[in-house]
Image (spheres, rainbow, N blue to C red):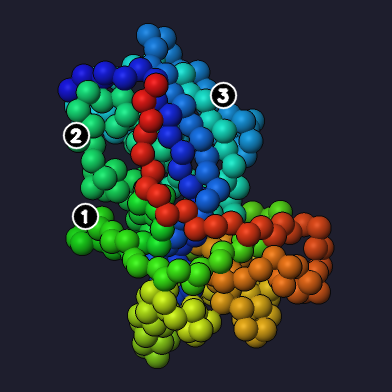
Amino acid sequence: MRIQNTRVAVRVPATSANLGPGFDALGLALDLCDELRVEATTGGIEIEVEGEGAGEVPGGEEHLVVRALRRGLDHAGAPQTGLRLRAVNRIPHGRGLGSSAAATVAGLLLARGMLAEPGALDDTDVLQLAAEFEGHPDNAAPALLGGVVLSWMQGERARAVPLAVGEEVLRPVVLLPRATLSTHRARGLLPETVPHGDAVINAARSALLVHALAGSPELLLEGTEDRLHQEQRAPGMPESVELLRVLRQEGHPAVVSGAGPSVLVLAGRRAELAPLVRRIVAEPAAWRIAEVPLRQVPSAPVVG
């Protein structure tokens, strides 16, 4: 396999995983994208980062996009090269919006764009490799495929299918705190076992959520009920979970976005939610509220 294209660009979206009951399985893409451009060179590594993570993310070979790109080239049997990478990051880091999955998918898609035969690194390969980086595919799948996606592991293989979403069902609003929470810490707060009754409720609500997304928005509140992970993570993000409780009491289909601490309202309006946030949180100025549309288009590299 040879490298044919020396300049490639890609846009990859933020994602929100779990959506309440669909722990490690459901996710959606949001129209908030990182933009990355790479140029193959005969030198070493040059990285320029603008926006989120500038001056904080690792440089050189440890940069996640570079690591994923090199893994993609290895998978396709292509040679390694020097790289000049420019990233314009808009996805907040450490907020439960899939920034690491976006970086991983971006690197793999940049590698695909460089190849003389892009089919050597198709969507199935990208999903599998991204899941190996991430540990599960719930963020990587919507980052790659767009829309709302159900993903799972079949043994060692990552699988994913897009879900039908009815028109006007989703009006995502992201409630974004200044505080951060690492996925590692958030997962460390989860218990080893859960009561059978809670597992039954989550299974039923996950199925109901799929039905609600297909065209029954009136069922989104019930369909997003969770017993497995959100309340359990309250010690790591108490204000987020309290905000979640009140929003749901007021009838809003709110969930913790991924590992948190951001909160996602699946169908809402900023004007309706802002007064609630001001009433509930101690420092309203520490929270941003944004209507962010669902991103339906798949991610793909652009050559040139």
Q: Give the CA separation, mark 3 to mark 1.
A: 34 Å
Residues under numbered marks 2 and 1 in contact, where contact means CB atoms less than 8 Å apart: no
Q: Mark 2 points at which residue?
A: 120
Work out whether residue 118 or residue 183 is closer to the camera in this orientation and state it: 118
Work out whether residue 298 or residue 192 is closer to the camera in this orientation and state it: 298
Can residue 233 be seen from the camera position used here? no
Residue 264 position in % (x across, y down) = 58, 66
* Disc 1 residue type (three-letter): Arg
Q: In this view, does 214 lie above or below 283?
A: below
Between tags 3 and 2, which lies in front?
A: 2
Residues under numbered marks 3 and 1 in contact, where contact means CB atoms less than 8 Å apart: no
- Residue at 40% of width from left, 90% of height from top? 197
Q: Name the residue under label 1.
A: 157
SS of the residue under disc 3? strand
SS of the residue under disc 2? helix
Residue at the limit of the structure toward the bottom, as seen here:
197
Residue 202 position in % (x across, y down) = 41, 82
Residue 71 position in % (x across, y down) = 30, 33
Q: Which of marks 2 and 1 is nearer the N terminus?
A: 2
- Residue at 56% of width from left, 24% of height from top? 48
Asked whether, in this view, residue 176 is left or right of residue 253, the answer is right
- Residue at 38% of width from left, 30% of height from top? 302
* Disc 2 residue type (three-letter): Ala
Can residue 255 be seen from the camera position used here? yes
Quadrant of residue 23 within the rendered picture? bottom left
